[in-house]
Amino acid sequence: MRNQPIGVMDSGVGGLTVVSEIWRQLPREEVLFYGDSARCPYGDRPAAEIAEFTFRALDFLVEQGVKMLVIACNTATAVCLEWARERYDIPVLGVIAPGARAAIAATTNQRVGIIGTRATISSNSYPRALHLTHRGIATFPVACPQFVSLVERGITATAELLPVVADSLREFSGMNIDTLILGCTHYPLLENVIQQALGADVTLINSAEETARDISFVLTDKQLTRTHPAKPNHVFFTSGDVDTFADIGKRWLGEPISVAYYDLWEGEERSDAAEV
């Protein structure tokens, strides 16, 4: 069991930010990733639909024999994490609690902004997670739903992005936040533009780093760390465009990845794997 891969799911490509940290902190571990880009974004959908899509992806990963599940999607974590922990007999981790912990450690004036999808923001998951540890923190949540579609289309670094991002973040003007939680795993791919829009004095929190630490702790605690001497074989599936996913993966992970198309809802698997 300890030599099985870590199963990671996301609504699209955003979960690659978590994979990047797994690779950096746990280089011996294998990853089996499923990104449901065909139905992305999840954040504007009803909770029942989010749960339906999330559990189809998690069931698929469990069927492949993973040793742990990571819900690398803030929306899916907000809606499904507790249900998933009851449903499966392997460890299940989300990305909200790690992000909240990192924000508490970073803020000095106790004023924390939060951006996420509509579903994540309306769930109140981040303020609740922050206040469980630190009741004195003031939270300022803002939904930025258009960011996900930009990332899924591979638009992450063009000059035209700055006014779009700045307009989405204008609500933070005058709020005096010193920390901003990127409450969607897609958002770190826009990190440079978000930082430009808010200024250098605001610390951006990407939950991926803290999530990887949680993964490491649980693997060690459960004696599930990989011991196989062979180089890890990472596997990526997407229900969306293979070439776009592979291109974003190469840019974010720093090396080419092989990506296969598989849409769990069509029951269709094609051989048009791409490597960029």
Image (cartoon, grey):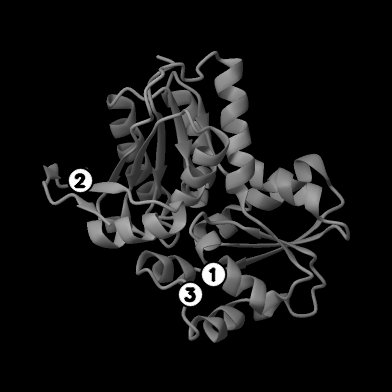
- Residue at disc 2, secondary structure: strand
Labels 2 & 1 near each other (Cβ < 8 A): no
Tell me if residue 111 can be seen: yes
Q: Tell me, for residue 144, which label it has, or none.
A: 1
Query: Which residue is depicted at the point 56% across and 82% down?
Result: 162
Which of pointers 2 and 3 lies earlier in the amino acid sequence?
A: 3
Which of pointers 2 and 1 lies earlier in the amino acid sequence?
A: 1
- Residue at disc 3, secondary structure: loop
Classify the position of the C terminus by image quarter: bottom left
The quarter of the picture where residue 87 lies is top left
| 142 versus 80 height, above or below | below
The quarter of the picture where residue 25 lies is top right
Closest to the observer: 238 or 86?
238
The nearer-to-camera label among 2 and 1 is: 2
The quarter of the picture where residue 215 lies is top right
Query: Which residue is depicted at the point 55% across and 22% down?
Result: 219
Tell me if residue 96 can be seen: no
**Left or right of residue 175, residue 251 in this image:** left
Q: Position of residue 185 (x, y in %)?
A: 51, 54
Q: What is the distance, in whole Å, between disc 2 and disc 1 at their CAs?
A: 28 Å
Q: What is the distance, in whole Å, between disc 2 and disc 3 at their CAs?
A: 28 Å
Q: Which residue is mark 3?
A: 157
Q: Which residue is mark 2?
A: 262
